Amino acid sequence: MGRFESGSYVLIMDNDTIAAISTPVGIGGIGIIKISGKNAKNIVSLIFRKSKSKNTKRFLEESHKVYHGHIVDPDSKKAIDEVLLTVMLAPHSYTGEDVVEINVHSGIFLLKTILNIVLTKGARIAEPGEFTKRAFINGRIDLTQAEAIIDIINAKSIKALEIANAQVDGELRNHVEKTLNILNNIFVKIEAAIDFPDAEECVSLEADIIIIENVVINKLNELISGYNEGHVIREGIKLVIAGRPNVGKSSLMNSLLQKERAIVTSIPGTTRDVIEETIIISGIPAIISDTAGLHDTIDPVESIGIKKAREQINNSDVILFVIDASSSFNEDDRRLFESIKNKLLIVVYNKIDLLTENHSFEICEEIKKYPMVKVSSLYNTGMDCLKENIKEIVIKDIDYSRLDIVPNLRQKIALEKCLENMVLVSKGIKDMLPYELISIDLAEAIESLNQVVGNMAKPDLLDQIFSRFCIGK
Ligand SMILES: Nc1nc2c(ncn2[C@@H]2O[C@H](COP(=O)(O)OP(=O)(O)OP(=O)(O)O)[C@@H](O)[C@H]2O)c(=O)[nH]1
Ligand SMILES: [Mg+2]
């Protein structure tokens, strides 16, 4: 273990050499075993037999080199697999430590055998995320970048991938650091006024209040609102298909997915459980849930399905409220509509293929205020129009140009905390509260912003105070 002291905080750094299989364990062309730490080079020197080549002198001493050879069993000295070894030396590696990657043929038994040999030679198995954690502790990346790496792995659409990549490049960090700079400068002034009351009259926060309100608070609001849009892109829009039994919800699900995913029958109450699938609409993932038909029932199984449907409705971004154009708008439709009318809603007028020319359909006036799409799930008509409507009400307001700075939930909560404190700071300055009180809120705001990027250490404020103020007189 090593200790890295930074301000009043101590980061505990583990000196073990760690190893893990970095690719999915299964049968495939290539599998990778990654080793990171001081002992990485030594471990591979014990188990790797390099193919003959003229240039053997600087083996394992040069960074960013690939070597061809075999992994050998340390006891029997027999070759286990033909491999490629990639060497990336500290500090120019993912973790900032010496990293060696062994590209082996991918088979579960083979990968595990080679990993075991690596472990017997002095590495320990890495914990989940430990390579990235080391990259953070070694200052290679900040927390926004570390979290973005997880987002890249989980990305479900090209847009989500773009956001995550921008975050890895440090876009959010840049914005947060600019704001931190401003807050630290104000903090320095206030601390100076507290510590050196004689100089208090030199401290004016008039200009700062304008910056706090027009720059800091605006930026924080912008970042926080960006979360909602980013959240939709990252995690997908949650679309729930709801309606009374037999109106064609499952048929609509199948038609949108273009596959027979949900069971369709003419018997009301066919769907009991929630069925979820993902489709991409305008580059954004949409998670669609087909649910049980909502109505009064004493059937215990159906009742459970209806309870689950209600839960889905509560957690939805948009509800596709399906009504059957070939039958009248009845009490079940009306009751369901009443319970969902405050949510984002698209009325899907299904089975239009059954309509005769002179058919008129009575629905309550209130429904006409909502977007309505006429479809036939049986004949797959109207689906493009429905997707356009979904796009219109959920996706159209997304400002793609802003998506380089989208925080995740943890970051959003920290930004909200910062905003809350900055509103108090601004009020405190206007109300001419004692500097000691303003300073408490400002310190909390700074701490929250530091949490966003993962800065544990507060800047050495005293140094800053002396360097910027002529206090020695
Ligand atoms: N003519 C016509 N029939 C349809 C259409 N959509 C669904 N149906 C029929 O309506 C019946 C019910 O369809 P489902 O998709 O199972 O209806 P549901 O709303 O999922 O029903 P529950 O799961 O029981 O609540 C089936 O016989 C379908 O073939 C349509 O657009 N036109
Ligand atoms: Mg169904």
Image (tube, helix red, strand yellow):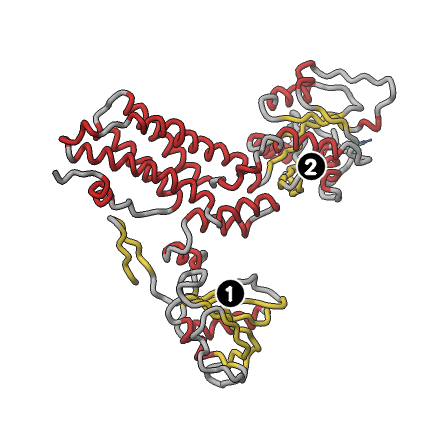
Percent coordinates x, y for residue 30 in the rendering: 59, 68
Q: Does residue 40 appear anywhere in the picture?
A: yes
Which of the 4 image quarters holds residue 202? top left
Q: Residue at x 77, y 36 (%)?
A: 265
Q: Does residue 307 appear anywhere in the picture?
A: no
Q: Secondary structure at mark 1?
A: strand
* Identity, as a three-letter code, of the amino acid under mark 1: Ile
Q: Residue at x 27, y 20 (%)?
A: 431
Q: Which image quarter is the N terminus in?
A: bottom left
- Name above or below for residue 19 compared with residue 190: below
Count every numbered label the image shows and give the total. Answer: 2
- Name above or below for residue 300 compared with residue 327: below
Percent coordinates x, y for residue 464 in the rendering: 24, 43
Label 2 C-beta lies within 8 Å of the nearest ligand 2 atom: yes
Q: Residue at x 76, y 19 (%)?
A: 328
Label 1 C-beta lies within 8 Å of the nearest ligand 2 atom: no
* Identity, as a three-letter code, of the amino acid under mark 2: Thr
Mark 1 crowdedness (10 Å alpha carbons): few <14, some 14-19, many ≥20: some
Q: Residue furthest top?
A: 365
User: Label 1 belongs to which residue?
Assistant: 21
- Name above or below for residue 23 compared with residue 291: below
From the viewer's side, name the closer residue of 405 and 41: 405
Percent coordinates x, y for residue 193 in the rendering: 19, 32
- Ligand 1 quarter of the rendering: top right
- Name above or below for residue 183 compared with residue 149: above
Q: Residue furthest right?
A: 357
User: Label 2 belongs to which residue?
Assistant: 271
Which of the 4 image quarters holds residue 318? top right
Percent coordinates x, y for residue 211 in the rendering: 36, 29
Earlier in the chain: of badge 2 and badge 1, it is: 1
Left or right of residue 426, residue 265 in this image: right
Q: Which image quarter is the C terminus in?
A: top left
